[in-house]
Structures are given as C-alpha cells and as structure tokens.
C-alpha cells in the first residue's frame, strides 16, 4: 500500500533536518579549524560558513559584523535561523511525531533523546573553548539516530524516503564544505601546496570524519587534488557526492518497483549520478570547481523538489 503524501513528506524532512543539524555542526567545525590558520585579522572564514550554509542574508538581517561568537550562536542556537542545530532538531522531532506510527519505537526514542540532550546543552551560550565538545556531541547523537535507523527499520518505502532525505542533505553539505575551502578561502597562488594550504585541506577531511579513511585510500599523501577527488567522486567514501547519489538512485529505483511507476525524479537522479561518474577531478578543477559545486547544489535542490512533486508532497524548507 502506498504511503500517504504527508507521511512521505514527514519522513523525508525528518531525515533532512536530522542530517542538517549534524551538517551545520560540521560546517562550524570546518570554519573553526580553518580560522586557527588564518594569518589575517579578517574573519573571512566565519562569513564563508554563513554563505556556504545559505544563511548569510538571515544573519545580516540581525547582525552587522561577523563576530565569531555571534556566528557560532546563530548557527547553533538561534531560532531565527531555521538551519541552526537547535531549530533543525526541533523540526526533525516535530516531523517525527507526525509520522510516529511509521517509525520503530527505538528510532523515535533515539530522535527524542537526541533532541532533549542537545536542547539542554544549548540552553546556555557556547564558548569558543566549548565548541569542539558541542560539535562532537551533535555528531554522536546523529550517529545514534543513524545506527538505530539502520538496525531497526524494515527495508520498505519508509526506509527509502528516509534515505532520500538524509543523502540529498548530505550531498548538499559535502559540496558546501568543499566550497568553504576552495572558493571562499582559496589561498594566494604562493600558498597553494604550502604547509598552511595542506593543513587547511586536512582540516576539511577532519570536519567530515574522513581523515583516517583518506589516509588508507591515498597512503597518507595529503594533496588538494586527491582530497577533492575523495570528497566528490570516491564511491567508497560515505559522505562523497558520488556515494550519496549511489544511495539516492538506488532508493528511487526501489520506490519505482514498489509503486510500479518510473517517475521523472529517477531520471534526474540518474543523470546527476552519471555526470559524477563521467567527471574527472582534474577537468573539474580546470573548469572551475566552484562553478561545478554551484551547479551541483542547484541540481540537487531541483531533485528534492521533483521528488516532492512526483510523490505528492511539497517540501518548502
């Protein structure tokens, strides 16, 4: 029996916002790590975090300066920022309550517990010294939810809509984290390949929990071109763009079979996935990595809208 549109909508957005909460923390992690290497007095990396998260306009409507503590508070706690960690988890929990009967008891309890734990931690301001511990807490609670989801949920259309929300959001985030370093924080030509440049790229790997796995794949040789390849095109890396689209296409394929109809969103996902398969990291960099990322984020958003239209729910966030 097909899911009602509102149930599919609730599952899709519940998992988008669970992933978004963790991804917002990861963007802050990338910004803080790169800030430690900033040799100038300008807070460019904090502005870049806001731009990459797509919330600079909302921030500028409230604040005039890119003060690190203010940016951190806006990204973690501010209810005027719908992508803040607190707001994202609250929205995820609200969607989870709407589709409670579609979730295993263990999964609902993991979502509810994570919301309670992080709400309590964010009730007081987070200092710069405390930020790494808070980021780790958000990542641990996200891992708890994902682990419970993977081990308690039946592999049916409910599972597929949850996966679609999570991996569309994850692909968006990985692209944005790459953009923080490559475009907004692109070093001067004299710094490319320097110890500073390499340290910043390693910081990007750590922010997506990929430092150790990258070392296994590339024998510990930290080169920008390899890191970009790893985060974009490596299908064994679970946060890469290519891996995300492997899961997205597979989930839509299962939904095609379940509903006995081939929707246009499947063709869009297949096209994006094929584009990633055909891409080479050198050609992408030569053609403009920022432009590639910008186009990818636009197409990823278009796919999310098509999924809502094809399965008769209409995401608005």
Image: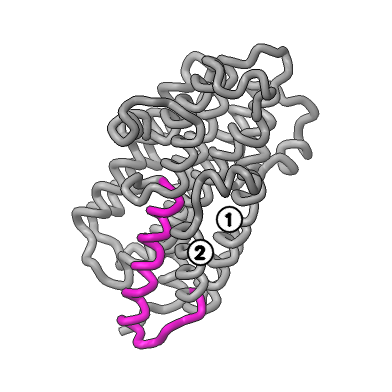
Expressed as whole percent of the image width and height from the top left, the position of residue 171 reads 48, 51
Q: Quadrant of the C terminus?
A: bottom right
Return the mark for residue 272: 2
Is the stretch drawn in magenta largely helix, strand or loop?
A: helix
Q: In this view, does 108 lie above or below 25?
A: below
Toward the left, the furthest residue is: 151
Which one is earlier in the sequence, the residue at label 1 or at label 2?
Answer: 2
The residue depicted at 38 percent of the width and 53 percent of the height is: 243
Q: Give the range drawn in magenta.
A: 240-265
Q: Which residue is drawn at 60% across and 28% down?
A: 73
Residue 115 found in image quarter: top left
- Alpha carbon distance from label 1 to label 2: 8 Å
**Is residue 123 among what the camera can see?**
no
Q: Is residue 258 magenta?
A: yes
Q: Position of residue 18 (x, y in %)?
A: 43, 49
Q: In this view, does 76 lie above or below 58?
A: above
């Amino acid at each position: 029996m097909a899911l009602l549109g509102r149930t599919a909508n609730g599952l899709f957005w519940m998992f988008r916002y669970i992933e978004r909460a963790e991804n917002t923390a990861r963007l802050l992690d990338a910004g803080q790590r790169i800030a430690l290497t900033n040799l100038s007095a300008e807070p460019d990396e904090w502005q870049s975090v806001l731009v990459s998260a797509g919330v600079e306009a909302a921030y500028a409507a409230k604040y005039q300066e890119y003060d690190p503590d203010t940016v951190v508070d806006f990204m973690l706690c501010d209810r005027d920022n719908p992508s803040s960690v607190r707001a994202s988890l609250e929205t995820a929990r609200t969607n989870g309550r709407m589709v409670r009967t579609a979730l295993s008891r263990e999964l609902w309890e993991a979502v509810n517990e994570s919301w309670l734990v992080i709400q309590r931690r964010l009730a007081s301001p987070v200092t710069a010294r405390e930020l790494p511990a808070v980021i780790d807490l958000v990542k641990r609670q996200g891992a708890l939810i994902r682990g419970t989801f993977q081990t308690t949920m039946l592999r049916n259309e409910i599972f597929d809509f949850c996966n679609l929300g999570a991996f569309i959001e994850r692909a968006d985030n990985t692209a944005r984290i790459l953009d923080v370093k490559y475009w907004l924080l692109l070093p001067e030509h004299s710094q490319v390949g320097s110890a500073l440049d390499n340290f910043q790229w390693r910081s990007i790997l750590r922010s997506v929990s990929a430092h150790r796995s990258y070392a296994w794949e590339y024998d510990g040789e930290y080169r920008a071109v390899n890191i970009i390849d790893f985060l974009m095109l490596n299908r064994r890396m679970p946060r890469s763009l290519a891996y995300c689209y492997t899961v997205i296409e597979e989930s839509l394929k299962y939904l095609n079979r379940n509903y006995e109809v081939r929707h246009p969103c499947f063709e869009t996902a297949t096209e994006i996935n094929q584009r990633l398969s055909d891409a080479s990291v050198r050609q992408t960099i030569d053609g403009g990595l920022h432009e590639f990322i910008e186009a990818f984020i636009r197409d990823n958003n278009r796919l999310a809208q098509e999924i809502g239209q094809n399965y008769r729910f209409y995401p608005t966030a």
